[in-house]
Image (cartoon, coloured by chain):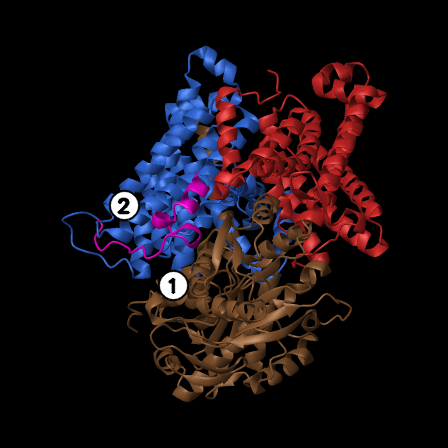
Chain colours: A red, B brown, C blue
């Protein structure tokens, strides 16, 4: 029996899951914007973020330190991947860049297993985030609410960074008019590195936020990557914010689909993507 | 664009590069062993990578120990042991199995962790006439897809559900409204089928079922429905990381007065993964617990601790006990010939690590006890056995009318 | 046919003859089957420059269609083979028609989405496909063609010969396709789509046709694979397998269709040998992927080209 309370809680749940997708898609879009290549290592960065958060918060006892360490470590890792590997390829060598990132992802994933073992891990949220809150129509896990708030704060902060600051103006110029940016004397190379670090850090943070919810498993990165890529394409590749909207939408659609066609909740997204691209090839918010 | 001269040059280049490719290929070939004429080859085709990557090493540990404890030989013939990675994929499993049979002379194997891989390998075992000792929650091994060459180590899902539900009925007589959360593939569906068979016999009502795809990460959308239905019991019919993740997210709903039962979900090795609050009072069904007080198990656990420093879990026990059983049958048969070993195994009665055990002649199901453990919150003690206590044992075999194995085939 | 093609085919035929001496029949058969699947992907990926991540769907549709017929009806091999080729070819035509109008990442994601749809359709349609457990009880047909005497395909050597003949024959046809006007249009569209269109080529039609043909040959490879282990496992349809096929083409070298079977052989044998060395072998594999991308973009064929002067020096022979 499907009541309005149940519908409400499914939507709330969908927004929380969607917030994680949005963070992933946001990072992917920023990297895609400057590098013109979807970051196939984004899932592995998500995985690394989750494990770093688990290790650091377990070691230090501080949940916040875990989140911070995850974002910082993956941002550095992203910077290293861009500087040491991706830069060595011509920017036009599309397939080779994808494969390079795929190989890098494999190495990162296996290194995580080599360090922390293949068995799944459990991470507890801090005590003040455990248990449920009453939404008025249903109990709702406090931690899911926290994910929504945390993701909203981070996305707003990055939005402000891109739209309201001097660095952001350059990043936007690099995405929208790379040739003009170059001729204006903007160091596009440094921008690409910065964007890669920013996107990677967002992936790591998403992993850290997901860890107490889904637990840690070595395949979490691959699973997340497939969804995040779909979200970005749905949102529109021309737009860095389309992915945020599409992420929330996909989360809600998946959550509602669980009410009627639970077995198909994964496949619904792929079917939706094919349909959207047939009707609106540039994605939801994309231009061109 | 290419002139004739170019073409010739290209031709030579192709020839040479083709030859280089050939040399590289030959260099990469696996070393091909001829099976020693007087030896017998045992093997584990088991996941070392992929979702169940952690299990392969444990199965291998147990299997090796069984061979070592037999002195590395059987009936005076040396035992060679090999281990191959099935990568958690049946396509890879069948290839590595076929190669091991043709290149290494493999004649007995175990090691599948996932049922689908084991069932795929079963078809190869039947054709190549090698003995498979499978494990896993699918009833098809000894049901619809039973085979003369395949034996099943794990308990039948009926035995599992009956044992666990008997315990719940006894300790929680008022828990009559059940909500099931099922992994939507053959394993989960078999458990659901038997949950209903056994539960309806007890007058339980099944007020809802949430079916989720295998490998789901996000359970809150199913749990919202489960919690909203206000059941007495939430029963998990999924396994491995699916069940652990599901339990962890259930903890977020703070549904304290709902009993959580997981008849075939979580192995003792995985108990530390479950949050303390969720583990307390959790009722779990198990194929193996290391604290069993049987002669064979005491011997096994002591030797395992000596060699690997920890207590064995399900995967290691499966590796050990399946090979120990085959070696026992070889001794009784007085030969390592697979046909005689199979006829000896059929109907064999023996003491396994699980206690008195027999093998059903008609289905190749190991008729064996199943265990119920109850989770404890105090995780202070490090050893895995301390996270739960053994509270019940049962061994009701699957009723014959429910078995789908009509013809197990010829040798 | 140019002389270079003749030499390449000679090497391929020689390798097919020598392989059973070095490898088991099942591994040798598998190398040939994936060699065909990779070669079938070549017109799309190598010639057309379209990075299709939906090849496993085509392989799988062929395998499940042919496999289902072999499991349920005692027909001569011809019919399951044709049915698998036709089903995969039809699906490929539909998929191609919808995908080729999109470029770069959209194209990759669309083919990937189609692959996922096929995967979940097969996964869900349990009554027919066996779902997660795969399609079981596939029987290798007792006769190849109607009205001909039977052949025992359960003998490994007979099956290998059959696979070798079919794969070699299909490879000849694929070679013709690559060298045909269709191949030239695809290549022109890869170099510069706008100019190719301006010359008057209907590039989308050519690309769709390439997909359709790729589907037919992928489907044949799929039917052979369904017979290989008497089962059709669902992982064969998973998108990971699509990625593997792209990588096989790349590892062999994008410059020639002869690279595809070499890439398939190297890929499979490399994984087999690495997995014996170390449990964490995918890490080594990842490093090799990075190495190939950074230093050996021409694949094994380029490596052969680089070795050529060294070989010549070693043999002390002058250039003929």
B144 sits to left or right of B117? left
A254 above or below A246?
A: below
Image coordinates for residue C159, horizontal then vertical, percent: 31, 56
- The chain ID associated with circle 1 is B
Graded by Cα atoms within 10 Å as few (under 14), some (14 to 19) or many (20 or more), the crowding at tag 1 reads many
Residue drawn at x 55%, y 50% is: B215
Using the image as rendered, state which of residue B302 and residue B99 is in the foreground: B302
Graded by Cα atoms within 10 Å as few (under 14), some (14 to 19) or many (20 or more), the crowding at tag 2 reads many
Q: Residue furthest front?
A: B174
Kindly state the secondary structure of the residue where label 1 is placed. Answer: helix
Using the image as rendered, state which of residue B265 and residue B230 is in the foreground: B230
Judging by the rendered image, the residue that carries numbered circle 1 is B124
- Is residue C16 covered in magenta? no
Kindly state the secondary structure of the residue where label 2 is placed. Answer: helix
Give yes or no for contact between labels 1 and 2 (Cβ–Cβ under 8 Å): no
Judging by the rendered image, the residue that carries numbered circle 2 is C80
- Is residue C122 covered in magenta? yes
Q: Is residue C186 visible?
A: yes
Please tell me the numbered disc located at residue B399: none
Residue drawn at x 48%, y 21% is: C101
Image coordinates for residue A188, horizontal then vertical, percent: 77, 23
| Numbered range of the magenta stretch | C118-144
Image coordinates for residue C7, horizontal then vertical, percent: 40, 41
Using the image as rendered, state which of residue B24 and residue C291 is in the foreground: C291
C213 sits to left or right of A153? left
C255 sits to left or right of B334? right
Mark 1 to mark 2 CA distance (whole Å): 22 Å
- The chain ID associated with circle 2 is C
Using the image as rendered, state which of residue C211 and residue B131 is in the foreground: B131
Image coordinates for residue B53, horizontal then vertical, percent: 59, 59
């Amino acid at each position: 029996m499907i009541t309005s309370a149940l519908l409400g809680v499914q939507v709330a749940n969908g927004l929380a899951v969607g917030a994680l997708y949005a963070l992933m898609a946001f990072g992917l879009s920023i990297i895609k914007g400057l590098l013109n290549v979807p970051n196939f290592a984004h899932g592995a960065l998500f995985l690394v973020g989750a494990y770093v958060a688990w290790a650091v918060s377990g070691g230090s006892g501080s949940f916040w330190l875990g989140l911070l360490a995850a974002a910082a470590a993956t941002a550095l890792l992203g910077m290293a991947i861009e500087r040491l590997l991706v830069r060595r390829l011509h920017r036009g060598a599309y397939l080779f860049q994808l494969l390079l990132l795929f190989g890098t992802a494999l190495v990162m994933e296996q290194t995580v297993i080599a360090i922390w073992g293949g068995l799944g891990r459990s991470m507890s949220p801090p005590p003040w985030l455990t248990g449920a809150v009453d939404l008025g129509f249903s109990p709702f896990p406090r931690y899911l609410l926290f994910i929504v708030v945390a993701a909203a704060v981070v996305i707003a902060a990055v939005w402000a960074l891109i739209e309201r600051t001097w660095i952001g103006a350059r990043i936007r110029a690099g995405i929208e008019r790379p040739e003009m940016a170059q001729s204006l004397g903007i160091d596009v190379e440094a921008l690409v590195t910065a964007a890669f670090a920013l996107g990677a850090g967002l992936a790591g943070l998403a992993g850290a936020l997901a860890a107490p919810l889904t637990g840690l498993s070595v395949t979490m990165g691959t699973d997340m990557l497939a969804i995040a890529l779909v979200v970005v394409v749905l949102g529109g590749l021309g737009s860095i914010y389309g992915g945020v909207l599409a992420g929330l939408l996909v989360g809600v659609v998946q959550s509602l689909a669980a009410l009627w066609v639970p077995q198909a909740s994964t496949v619904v997204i792929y079917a939706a993507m094919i349909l959207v691209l047939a009707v609106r090839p540039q994605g939801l918010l994309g231009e061109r | 664009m290419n002139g004739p001269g170019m073409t010739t040059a290209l031709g030579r280049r192709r020839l040479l590069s083709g030859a280089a490719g050939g040399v590289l290929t030959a260099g990469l070939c696996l070393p091909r062993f001829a099976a020693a004429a007087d030896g017998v080859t045992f093997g584990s085709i088991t996941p070392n990578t992929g979702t169940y990557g952690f299990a392969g090493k444990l199965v291998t540990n147990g299997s090796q120990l069984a061979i070592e404890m037999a002195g590395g030989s059987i009936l005076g013939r040396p035992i060679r042991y090999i281990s191959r990675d099935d990568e958690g994929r049946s396509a890879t499993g069948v290839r590595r199995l076929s190669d091991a049979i043709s290149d290494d002379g493999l004649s007995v194997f175990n090691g599948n962790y996932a049922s689908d891989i084991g069932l795929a390998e079963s078809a190869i075992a039947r054709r190549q006439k090698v003995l498979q000792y499978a494990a896993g929650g699918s009833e098809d091994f000894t049901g619809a897809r039973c085979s003369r060459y395949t034996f099943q180590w794990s308990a039948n899902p009926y035995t599992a559900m009956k044992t666990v539900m008997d315990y719940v009925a006894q300790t929680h007589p008022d828990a009559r409204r059940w909500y099931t959360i099922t992994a939507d593939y053959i394993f989960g569906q078999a458990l659901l089928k038997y949950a209903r068979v056994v539960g309806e016999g007890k007058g339980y009502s099944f007020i809802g079922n949430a079916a989720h795809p295998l490998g789901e990460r996000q359970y809150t959308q199913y749990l919202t429905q489960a919690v909203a239905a206000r059941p007495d019991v939430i029963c998990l019919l999924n396994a491995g990381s699916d069940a652990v993740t599901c339990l962890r997210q259930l903890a977020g709903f703070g549904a304290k007065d709902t009993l959580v039962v997981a008849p075939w979900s979580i192995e003792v090795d995985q108990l530390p993964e479950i949050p303390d609050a969720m583990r307390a009072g959790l009722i779990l069904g198990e194929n193996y617990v290391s604290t069993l007080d049987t002669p064979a198990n005491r011997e096994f656990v002591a030797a395992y601790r000596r060699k690997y420093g920890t207590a064995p879990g399900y995967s290691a026990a499966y590796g050990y006990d399946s090979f120990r059983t085959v070696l026992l049958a070889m001794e009784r048969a007085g030969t390592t010939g697979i046909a005689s070993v199979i006829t000896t195994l059929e109907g064999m009665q023996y003491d396994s690590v699980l206690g008195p055990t027999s093998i059903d002649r008609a289905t190749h199901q190991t008729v064996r006890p199943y265990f119920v453990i109850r989770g404890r919150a105090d995780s202070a003690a490090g050893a895995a056995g301390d996270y739960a206590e053994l509270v019940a044992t049962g061994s009701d075999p699957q009723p014959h009318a429910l078995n789908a194995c009509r013809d197990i085939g010829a040798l | 046919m140019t002389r270079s093609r003749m030499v390449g085919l000679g090497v391929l035929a020689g390798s097919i003859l020598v392989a059973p001496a070095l490898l088991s029949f099942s591994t040798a058969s598998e190398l040939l089957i994936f060699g065909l699947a990779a070669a079938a992907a070549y017109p799309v990926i190598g010639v057309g420059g379209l990075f299709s991540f939906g090849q496993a769907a085509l392989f799988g549709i062929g395998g499940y269609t042919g496999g289902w017929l072999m499991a349920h009806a005692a027909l001569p091999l011809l019919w399951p083979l044709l049915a698998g080729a036709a089903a995969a070819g039809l699906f490929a035509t539909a998929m191609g028609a919808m995908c080729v109008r999109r470029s770069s990442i959209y194209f990759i994601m669309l083919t990937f989405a189609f692959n996922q749809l096929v995967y979940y359709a097969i996964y869900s349609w349990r009554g027919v496909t066996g779902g997660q457990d795969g399609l079981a009880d596939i029987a290798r047909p007792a006769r190849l063609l109607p009205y001909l005497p039977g052949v025992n395909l359960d003998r490994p050597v007979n099956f290998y010969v059959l696979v070798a003949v079919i794969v070699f024959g299909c490879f000849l046809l694929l070679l013709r396709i690559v060298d045909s006007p269709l191949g030239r249009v695809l290549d022109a569209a890869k170099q510069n789509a706008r100019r190719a269109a301006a010359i008057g080529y209907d590039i989308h039609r050519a690309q769709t046709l390439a997909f359709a043909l790729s589907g037919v040959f992928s489907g044949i490879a799929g039917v052979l694979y369904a017979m290989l282990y008497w089962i059709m496992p669902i992982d064969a349809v998973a998108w990971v397998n699509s990625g593997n096929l792209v990588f096989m083409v790349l590892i062999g070298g994008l410059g020639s269709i002869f690279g595809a079977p070499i890439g398939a052989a190297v890929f499979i044998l490399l994984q087999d040998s690495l997995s014996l060395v170390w449990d964490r072998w995918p890490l080594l594999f990842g490093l090799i992927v990075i190495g190939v991308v950074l230093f050996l973009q021409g694949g094994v064929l380029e490596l052969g080209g680089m070795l050529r002067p060294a070989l010549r020096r070693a043999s002390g022979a002058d250039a003929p």
